[in-house]
Structures are given as structure tokens and as C-alpha cells.
């Protein structure tokens, strides 16, 4: 049997879980169900699958440092982290993974896993992969169909046909030929699908050989095949990442695996999966998946309720209190609060689109912004001043930089700071401070073994994150937009 290479798709923006999920810190990077993030849970699920190589992760270049750090913290070393210069949906992303595998002289079976799924019984999922891998290695294009628990209208469906093969070990069940994929149905149609026993939810998880996928892609989407290959051929290595060629990838059509290949190929097969799956596509899905109290509430953080039922209540910073609330979602973060009926959470995208249209930073950023060296959080901001809490990870350092429009005061509140200020080097400990005049080259470094925390007071005529001129950076960001990657 061919080696299995897991391909973790981590390119989503997660706008349906706003305000917790935002463009620069989407849902797959959040711990929404359990102590690990959804990306980390996905990485951990592949540990128990035998004959697997290190996974490939396909992600947006803006998320690369968070993805690398989260993978490192799980102990799962990626075989490659491939950076998409722009989102082009799942079909091009998987093509890129297939080309990369074949370039290395391998022709593995690719196990395609979206990074944002929740699976409560990972052992069942692992058994299904093991049972189906031999059929995928012989040329079958397998998708995993979720055994429906009800007439869900938010998912696409897969209709099964005749049995292709029955499993004799590891799990009960069979592989079926796919008759057709169907779009998200209305409630009456979904009810008929579930009652028939012939339909599964479309999970978006796949198993197929790299060359088989590319052959089918070339047959049905030759332009997509052409430009993803060109983007891979012209890719460059950047630190621990592989950057696809932006010009070629931008010419690639955008489409899902389902539309581009699986709905058109005669190789499609489906394996039933009953593993407590959810795509965490909305706050109502998190309510469905979460542990509910006697009143049917899912509570997170500092929450007090009275006469409240059927709600998902999330407190990030402050006390959230409810009285007489029914079937609602309340999400509190440092800079935004969402209140919505549970049955209208799909309309949250309207709010996000409005915020984007108004250039509101709440659509993209949290008040705490993560960087490869740590994070910063805006505490208070005024007309010509801003106060931030900066956290620098042990042994990490910021770029050598300067600002045209602002000066900065730094006060160390925890740890030790090594400060470069012009031609000087200063070592500051707790309760010590320094001043960085406007136009002065400077760098902040944490030489210690505990996180460095300091208060930064900015003053000047312009305090935007894009007022950064970088001269040297260990993370290779000197040519990027500081507003997105400061």
C-alpha cells in the first residue's frame, strides 16, 4: 500500500464565527472545543494512523507563523508548510499538495483534512482511513460521508450506490459508489434524504492517490491544473515555508474539490463515517457540539444566567449576565460583542461584510494581535497617543526598525529586555524604562527564559502599524506590509 500523506487545509477565514474568529486569526487557530485549537486537534488525529508521512499544511501566508507555532507545540513536525498568496478554494490547494508530493519522487495517497473540523471520536475516523487506504491506493477517489443525525439543511449531501467493497477488519461497513453529490437541500428534502438511508452529509474529507487526483483535475479543469503546476514549479523556499508563485497562482480558477473533480469523476466512492463530526461552521453548530447544562445552555468564561435556556454564551474578558434569554448567541470579546438569535447566526456574514466595507479593523484584527515573536494588545488609544501591552516570547526579538511619525516609551513590567536604540544597547529589568525618539533605529529582544512583558506608550501625529521601516528581521518580513505582519 502507498504511503499516506495527510494534507491539512488551513486556509479559511472563519467569518461565520465572528467576533472570535477574524481574518488574521481564523477559527482553525482557536481553541473552540477543548484545550487545543482545531488545527492542533486535526494534527493530533493523524498520529494514530499507521503508514503516514509528516503532514503537509496549506495555509494563507498571513497565518504562517501561527500555524508553524501551533504545529510545533503539538509535536507534529510538518513535511511542508505551503503558503497560498491568495485564496483559491480547496481544489487548487490539494493540487499544490499533489504536485509537491510528486516532485519529491513519491506517489502517496493524500488524506485531505480541513483544519476546522471537530471530531469527537477520532478513533472511528482513524479506523475508516485505515480501512479505505488500500482502495485509494488502487485508484479509488474516496470521500467520507457523515452518517446524518437529522435533516440538516446547512450541509451538502452524497447519495450512495452499490457496494464496492466491504470491510473485514477494523470497523463495520463498506465502501459505496457515489451516485451523486447534491446541494444543501430545503428542510423537506433533507428529511426525505435522512429517512431514505441512502444519503450522507458531505464532510469535505478525501482520500486518493496524488497522481489520480491530478489526472482527473487535468481532465476536467485543465486551466487549474496548468496554473497550480506553474505556481509549484516557480515556488521558492522562505525560512521554513514554501511560497507559491503569486503571479501564476492568481491566474488559477477558484473552485472546491467537489465541483472541480468529485462530482464529475467516475472514480468517486464514499465511506460512511459516524464519528461525532461537526464542521463548526456557525455558533449554532458549536452549541450543538458543546456540553449543555440542565437548561440547554453552553457556557464559556465568566457567565451568570437567570431564567435562560438554549443559549451559547461566551465571555472572553468581562462578566456576561443574562435574564430571560431564549435560544440566543452572546459572544463577548475585548473589542466587540455579538448578540443574535441562534437560528439567524448565518447572517453574521452581513455584519462582517459591513465592517470590511467601512474599513473597520474589527473585521480583521483582535485587540490582541499575534506576531511570530509574541503579541501586542491595545489597552487604550487617543487622538495622539496609544498604550499597548507587548509580550515577547523567550529568545525572540522584533525587527530592527524605525518610525517616521511616532516616539515610544517602554516600561518593563515582567522579565528582561535587551534594547537596541541607535548605537546603544540597554539591558532593562522590571520597573525600568527607556525612550525611543522619533526616527531612531531600535530593536526589542527577550534574552531570557520567561516571557517579556512591557508597556509601550506611543505618541505622535500618526500611530498606524504601517509606520514601520524595517532594516533587518529574522522572520524574513522586510518586504511585507507591516500593517498585516508587523
Image (cartoon, grey):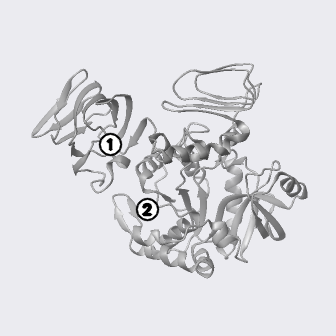
462 or 9, nearer to the observer? 462
The residue shown at (48%, 44%) is 358
Q: Residues within 10 Å of mark 2 (few under 14, many from 20)?
A: some
Q: Quadrant of the N terminus?
A: bottom right
Q: Is residue 267 left or right of residue 88?
A: right
Which quadrant does the C terminus fall into?
A: top left
Q: Residue at x 38, y 73 (%)?
A: 234
Pointers 1 and 2 in contact (C-beta within 8 Å): no
Viewer-closest of 1 and 70: 70
Residue at 67% from the left image edge and 45% from the top image edge: 346
- What secondary structure is found at the residue carrying circle 2? loop
Q: Earlier in the sequence, mark 1 or mark 2?
A: 2
Does any portion of residue 105 appear in the rendered image?
A: no
Residue 86, placed above or below residue 477 = below
**Residue 207: x percent and y percent?**
65, 66
Q: Does 198 sit left or right of 242 as displayed?
A: right
**Which is nearer the eye, 180 or 143?**
180
Q: Return the residue at label 2.
A: 85
Please state if 424 lies on the left or on the right of 71 as rendered.
left
Of the residues tagged 1 and 2, which is closer to the observer?
1
The secondary element bearing badge 1 is classed as: loop
Q: Is the residue marked by circle 1 packed among few (<14), some (14-19), or many (20+) residues within 10 Å?
A: few
For disc 1, the marked residue is: 465
Q: Nearer the viewer, residue 303 or 148?
A: 303
In the rendered image of this protein, does residue 359 appear above or below residue 200? above
Residue 455 occupies quadrant:
top left
Please state the horizontal and vertical placement of residue 467, each as a whole percent of the image: 27, 44
Amino acid at each position: 500500500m502507498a504511503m499516506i500523506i495527510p494534507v491539512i487545509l488551513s486556509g479559511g477565514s472563519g467569518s461565520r464565527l465572528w467576533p472570535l474568529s477574524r481574518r488574521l486569526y481564523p477559527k482553525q487557530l482557536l481553541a473552540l472545543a477543548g484545550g487545543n485549537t482545531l488545527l492542533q486537534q486535526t494534527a493530533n488525529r493523524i498520529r494514530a494512523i499507521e503508514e503516514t508521512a509528516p503532514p503537509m499544511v496549506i495555509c494563507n501566508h498571513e497565518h504562517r507563523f501561527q500555524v508553524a507555532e501551533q504545529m510545533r507545540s503539538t509535536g507534529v513536525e510538518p513535511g511542508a508548510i505551503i503558503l497560498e498568496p491568495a485564496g483559491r478554494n480547496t481544489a487548487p490547494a490539494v493540487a499544490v499538495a499533489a504536485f509537491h508530493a510528486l516532485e519529491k519522487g513519491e506517489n502517496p495517497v493524500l488524506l485531505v483534512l480541513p483544519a476546522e473540523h471537530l471530531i469527537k471520536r477520532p478513533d472511528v475516523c482513524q479506523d475508516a482511513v485505515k480501512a479505505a487506504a488500500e482502495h485509494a491506493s488502487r485508484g479509488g477517489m474516496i470521500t467520507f460521508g457523515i452518517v446524518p443525525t437529522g435533516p440538516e439543511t446547512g450541509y451538502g449531501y452524497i447519495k450512495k450506490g452499490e457496494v464496492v467493497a466491504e470491510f473485514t477488519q477494523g470497523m463495520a461497513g463498506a465502501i459505496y459508489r457515489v451516485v451523486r453529490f447534491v446541494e444543501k437541500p430545503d428542510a423537506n428534502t433533507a428529511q426525505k434524504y435522512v429517512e431514505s438511508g441512502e444519503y450522507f452529509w458531505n464532510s469535505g474529507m478525501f482520500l486518493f492517490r496524488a497522481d489520480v487526483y491530478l489526472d482527473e483535475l487535468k481532465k476536467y479543469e485543465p486551466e487549474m491544473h496548468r496554473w497550480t503546476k506553474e505556481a509549484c514549479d516557480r515556488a521558492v523556499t522562505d525560512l521554513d515555508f514554501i511560497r507559491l508563485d503569486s503571479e501564476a497562482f492568481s491566474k488559477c480558477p477558484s473552485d472546491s474539490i467537489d465541483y472541480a473533480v468529485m462530482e464529475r469523476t467516475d472514480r468517486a466512492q464514499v465511506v460512511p463515517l459516524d464519528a461525532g463530526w461537526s464542521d463548526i461552521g456557525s455558533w449554532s453548530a458549536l452549541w450543538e457540539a458543546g456540553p449543555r447544562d440542565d437548561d440547554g445552555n453552553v457556557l464559556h468564561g465568566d457567565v451568570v444566567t437567570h431564567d435562560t435556556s438554549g443559549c451559547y454564551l461566551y465571555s472572553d474578558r468581562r462578566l456576561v449576565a443574562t435574564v430571560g434569554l431564549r435560544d440566543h448567541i452572546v459572544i463577548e470579546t475585548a473589542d466587540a460583542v455579538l448578540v443574535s438569535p441562534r437560528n439567524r447566526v448565518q447572517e453574521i456574514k452581513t455584519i462582517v461584510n459591513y465592517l470590511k466595507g467601512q474599513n473597520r479593523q474589527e473585521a480583521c484584527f483582535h485587540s490582541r494581535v499575534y506576531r511570530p515573536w509574541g503579541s501586542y494588545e491595545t489597552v487604550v488609544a487617543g487622538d495622539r497617543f496609544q498604550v499597548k501591552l507587548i509580550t515577547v516570547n523567550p529568545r525572540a526579538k522584533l525587527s530592527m526598525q524605525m518610525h517616521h511619525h511616532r516616539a515610544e516609551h517602554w516600561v518593563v513590567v515582567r522579565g528582561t529586555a535587551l534594547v537596541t536604540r541607535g548605537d546603544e544597547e540597554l539591558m532593562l529589568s522590571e520597573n525600568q524604562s527607556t525612550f525611543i525618539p522619533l526616527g531612531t533605529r531600535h530593536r526589542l529582544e527577550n534574552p531570557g527564559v520567561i516571557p517579556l512583558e512591557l508597556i509601550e506608550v506611543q505618541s505622535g501625529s500618526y500611530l498606524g502599524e504601517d509606520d514601520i521601516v524595517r532594516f533587518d528581521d529574522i522572520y524574513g518580513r522586510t518586504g511585507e506590509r507591516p500593517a498585516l505582519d508587523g
